[in-house]
Amino acid sequence: MPSVPTTSLDLTAAEVIADPYPFFAAERARHPVAWHEASQMWLAFDHASVSAVQRDRRLGRLWKDKQPADYLKPFNLLHRNQMMENEPPEHTRLRRPVARVFARGHIERLRPRVGELARELLDEVDPASFDVIGQFAEPLPVLVIAELLGVPSSTAAELREWSQAIVRMYEVDPSPAVVDAAVAAAADFGGLIRDLIRERTVRPREDLLSDLAQTELSEDEMVASGVLLLNAGHEASVNVFGNGLTAMLQRGLRPGADVAVTVEEMLRFDSALQLFERTAMEPVEVGGITVEEGQKIAVLLGSANRDQAVFDDPDELRVDREPNNHVAFGVGVHFCLGAPLARMELFESVTALFDACPELDLVGDPVSRGTFVLRGYHSVPVGSKRS
């Protein structure tokens, strides 16, 4: 390869996983885009390049089955038929019916129920000391997205386990144990949704799976959409909430007067999704380099969200920051379909938590999940000073 900007950033290093932002800042100061030999792809660091990559239709999500294909069939089946892993016109065909379903008012219909579920969960904790991830942030979005789709709440614990097992496959160089767990989870998760889709085809209810069952999607495509919504609806909400809340409490902050504005800063400050790949379908210039046909380029969303060219004092968490042109939900054709649900859910959960525990504080050290691509906490011990 001709002389090009390169980076030796180790995305698996403990110090990078613990706090990637100083490393991102150093990379942005050297180059907007650089070749990463370890992963054999380009990495985009600055806001302008990250945005350009996501908007350029010549850079697409091109799914290739994971190997060995026979063993990984359950995992591949779910992803091959997802809108997130396809480009137009397939992406449009897969996304349109799901978008129509979302537009039927399901999200706003759920808003009072989200607040109710949040308060019920908080009524069950000891305000003097509880794990805000395990006892609040994790169960809430699972219950919400399960209710939205029409999945029995009795399966909530399994949904959480399956979701976490599947998304670990998105990390850099997953271990054989992670692969085995993801395959098993994909088979069980897909099987549950398939059974429910078939049931709703015959006996529809007032839920999203029933609406999906009436669309033109194939059964495999409906199953993949259902699993995607459950995974994305769970993982994003848990990690955005946990990351943002922990950052606030570490700095002695509380939500601002406009909680919706604070939610946007939580999304920006410590991004739940850090890396998203694209593949060049023809040569594309971005950030001063050329991505050749067939090469991959990964956008680093967390790095873009700390770009000093876009955000004043980007390493400072401001609960009233406006404007806030973050890219946490992506941009362009793959902009997160569940963004309105995530925003609503975060607003209701943050409001409920600080209404119930106005003197909330950390009472122990947060424990990281130890992952890079999907960044979050395993546990965050908190308590109320007045309890």
Image (tube, helix red, strand yellow):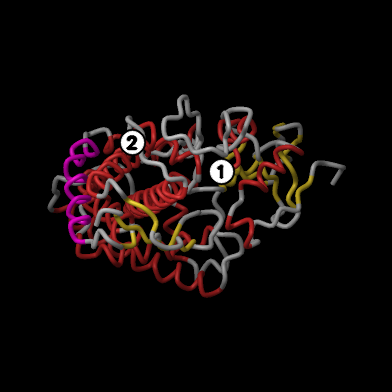
Residue type, label 1: Gly
Residue 376 is a magenta residue: no
Front-lying residue, 173 or 140: 140
Name which quarter of the figure residue 282 lies in.
Answer: top right
- Distance Cα–Cα, label 1 vs label 2: 20 Å
Residue found at the far front of this picture: 386
Q: Position of residue 338 (x, y in %)?
A: 36, 41
Secondary structure type for disc 1:
helix
Q: Residue at x 50, y 54 (%)?
A: 374
* Label 2 packing within 10 angstroms: few (<14), some (14-19), many (20+): few
- The segment highlighted magenta reads 106-124
Which three-letter amino acid code belongs to the residue tagged 2? Answer: Pro
Measured along the vertical axis of the image, is residue 169 above or below residue 311?
below
Q: Secondary structure at mark 2?
A: helix
Whether residue 97 is visible, yes or no, is no
Give the residue at x 46% y 59%. Answer: 167
In which image quadrant can residue 181 be found?
bottom left
Residue 103 x, y percent position in the rendering: 27, 33
Query: Residue 110 has which mark?
Result: none
Residue highlighted by disc 1: 302
Which badge, 1 or 2, is on the more N-terminal residue?
A: 1
Number of the label disc, if any, that sits on residue 340: 2
Q: Are marks 1 and 2 in contact (CB under 8 Å)?
A: no
Q: For residue 116: magenta?
A: yes
- Number of residues whose C-alpha sits closer than 10 Å to that of mark 1, classed few (under 14), some (14–19) or many (20 or more): many
Q: Is residue 212 above or below residue 169?
A: above
Residue depicted at 70% across the width and 49% down the height: 41
In this rendering, would 363 be left or right of 120?
right
